[in-house]
Amino acid sequence: MSQTIGSGARDRLRIAIQKSGRLAEPARALLTSCGLSWRESRDRLFCYGESLPIDLLLVRDDDIPGLIRDGVCDLGVVGRNVLLEQDIAVRREREASVFRELRALGFGGCRLALAVPEGWEWRDPSQLAGKRIATSYPQILQQWLDGQGVQAGVVELSGSVEIAPKLGQADLICDLVSSGATLAANQLKPVMTLIESEAVLAGPVAAFDDARGELAELLLRRLDGVLRMRHSKLLMFRAPREAIPSLLPLLPDAEAPTVMQVEGSDGLALQALCHGVVTWQRLEELKQAGASGLLVLPVEGMLA
Ligand SMILES: Nc1ncnc2c1ncn2[C@@H]1O[C@H](COP(=O)(O)OP(=O)(O)OP(=O)(O)O)[C@@H](O)[C@H]1O
Ligand SMILES: O=P(O)(O)OC[C@H]1O[C@H](OP(=O)(O)OP(=O)(O)O)[C@H](O)[C@@H]1O
Ligand SMILES: [Mg+2]
């Protein structure tokens, strides 16, 4: 089988992920937990899929939507902020989306927010009329301003947006915020959230009409199993039969527990798949209610 990147062979699925940066490691780890493995090329920009015919292309995150649009890659892991920014640009040109968000992946969480100098008294978006707003997301910002019916100047910067008000380039900014530390360090405060973002699996709007369709479906099924189980834990413990009524209310987030008879005793062994956080406090409460030999096990995936 050909390994040429641009061969046009369509019996392999190609996923673009960030080469380095915030999304690089978690994206790879997630795909690995879906059972994918790769033989890396020496330059590490293309990774040939070994366990399945699913290859990786390692790129700058901003390039991912364009690679999908041009059919160079079939899927991509990218921030919703980047996908939406480029989707709006495409829709302005073609009047139809070419990308779609297939799954939210639960990492790379942040929000795109308006932030103003700390001294500003914020009331509502009408205050933005005639102001200059620095951002790396001009399309999302302009669409939001249009929706608010506000006319403001959009100053596009590719980075270090938070310094723009101090440099006199803009009156306020529209940038990504996570902890808020960068804003605080620049004497800015967030006042409006335009979008909530996280890493997403993106793909084309058009369906695949060859072997890639089945590969994409297989990957999505595995991904759903992994995502569903991501915060789940398998709880195993023993308990006397009479403790069951006081133990079950302590497992409100668990699927119906499996209860087994322990050989040679009249005690029971229980197994419960908990979808919420299993804290030390909860374990202590279970122990007090009669549970013993408590084991908390991580769950890697589930095929329903
Ligand atoms: N502070 C943050 N906390 C959490 N997620 C963030 C934060 N900042 C950005 N992100 C998310 O991570 C994505 C990638 O951010 P990163 O800083 O690695 O991008 P980059 O510098 O543009 O990388 P590249 O070199 O690939 O162009 C962003 O598009 C956003 O979705
Ligand atoms: O609210 P915080 O937790 O401070 O995070 C927000 C900052 O994180 C991102 O920048 P990053 O650190 O990735 O630097 P970069 O923009 O230069 O890549 C973003 O562009 C903000 O500047
Ligand atoms: Mg980038």
Image (spheres, rainbow, N blue to C red):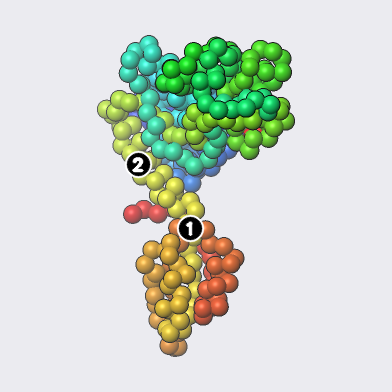
Residue 77 lies, in percent from the top left, at: 48, 32
Residue 61 lies, in percent from the top left, at: 53, 25
**Identity of the residue drawn at 29% across and 28% down:** 207
Disc 1, SS: loop
Query: Camera-side residue: 221 or 40?
Result: 221
Task: List the residue tagged with mark 2.
Answer: 218
The kind of residue tagged 2 is: Leu
Rate crowding at label 1 as few (under 14), some (14 to 19) or many (20 or more) other CA atoms within 10 Å.
few
Sequence-wise, the earlier of marks 2 and 1 is 2
Instruction: State whether residue 141 is above or below residue 217.
Output: above
Residue 81 lies, in percent from the top left, at: 50, 27
Q: Quadrant of the C terminus?
A: bottom left
Residue 276, disc:
1
Disc 2, SS: helix
Residue 265, disc:
none
Instruction: State whether residue 183 is above or below residue 36.
Output: above
**Identity of the residue drawn at 57% across and 23% down:** 174
Count of numbered badges drawn on the protein: 2
Would residue 118 be found to the left or right of residue 246 on screen?
A: right
Q: CA distance from mark 2 to mark 1?
A: 27 Å
**Identity of the residue drawn at 62% across and 27% down:** 121
The kind of residue tagged 1 is: Gly
**Identity of the residue drawn at 33% across and 31% down:** 212
Would residue 282 be found to the left or right of residue 215 on screen?
A: right
Instruction: State whether residue 211 is above or below residue 240.
Output: above
Residue 258 lies, in percent from the top left, at: 38, 71
Would residue 65 be seen by someone viewing this image from the given angle?
A: no
Q: Quadrant of residue 220?
A: top left
